[in-house]
Image: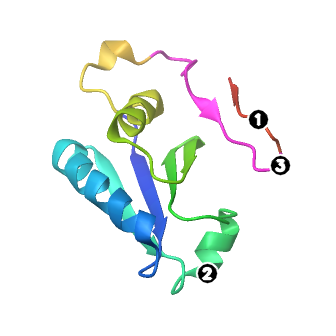
Amino acid sequence: MMTVTLKNFHADWCGPCKTQESILNNLKNEWGDRVNFEDIDVDNNSDIADSYQVRSLPTLVIENEQGVVERFVGVTQGEKINTAFEEAGVLEDQENITSSNSNTRVYDPDSNSNSLS
């Protein structure tokens, strides 16, 4: 199983971030033992937000050892995040993980579209 991290970029003054927090709390109960959840307050960690090119809140970045798998801007429902976790390699059944990780999305911040590799 790959190490998967969800970075939640938020701020205290952001109303939609509070909605996203509620969704993430439910996901933590379901995935907490298999996914690392990181809450990043952009007001206190602007350097990290800049390095991920965060321009809108909330922004969620899902990563594995190969890099960014998925990026969501705005409030994102749990179903989409669950799918991204699975694409990132968070599966209990190891036979469902392909050796080439053909379903992993490669995020390129310089590109307008993300492609499947």
Relative vertical location of residue 78 with respect to residue 96 in this rendering, above or below: below
Asked if the stretch drawn in magenta spans residue 107, the answer is yes
Mark 2 or mark 1: name the one nearer the start of the chain. Answer: 2
Give me the residue at 35% from left, 67% from top.
Answer: 18
Relative vertical location of residue 19 with respect to residue 115 in this rendering, above or below: below
Left or right of residue 92: residue 48: right
Q: Which residue is mark 2?
A: 46
For residue 24, the mark is none
The part of the image, by quadrant, that contains residue 17 is bottom left
Disc 1 crowd, CA 10 A, few/some/many (<14, 14-19, 20+): few
Residue 34 percent location from the top left of the image:
26, 43
Residue kind at label 3, given as amino acid type: Asp
Residue 67 percent location from the top left of the image:
59, 45
Give me the residue at 46% from left, 59% from top.
Answer: 7
CB under 8 Å between callouts 2 and 3?
A: no
Q: Which residue is mark 1?
A: 113
Disc 3 crowd, CA 10 A, few/some/many (<14, 14-19, 20+): few
Give me the residue at 81% from left, 40% from top.
Answer: 112
Residue kind at label 2, given as amino acid type: Ser
Q: CA distance from mark 3 to mark 1?
A: 9 Å
Residue 101 percent location from the top left of the image:
54, 22
Image quadrant containing the C terminus: top right
Element under disc 1: loop
Asked if the stretch drawn in magenta spans residue 53, the answer is no
Residue kind at label 1, given as amino acid type: Ser
Q: CA distance from mark 2 to mark 1?
A: 25 Å
For the stretch drawn in magenta, the main secondary structure is: loop
Image quadrant containing the N terminus: top left
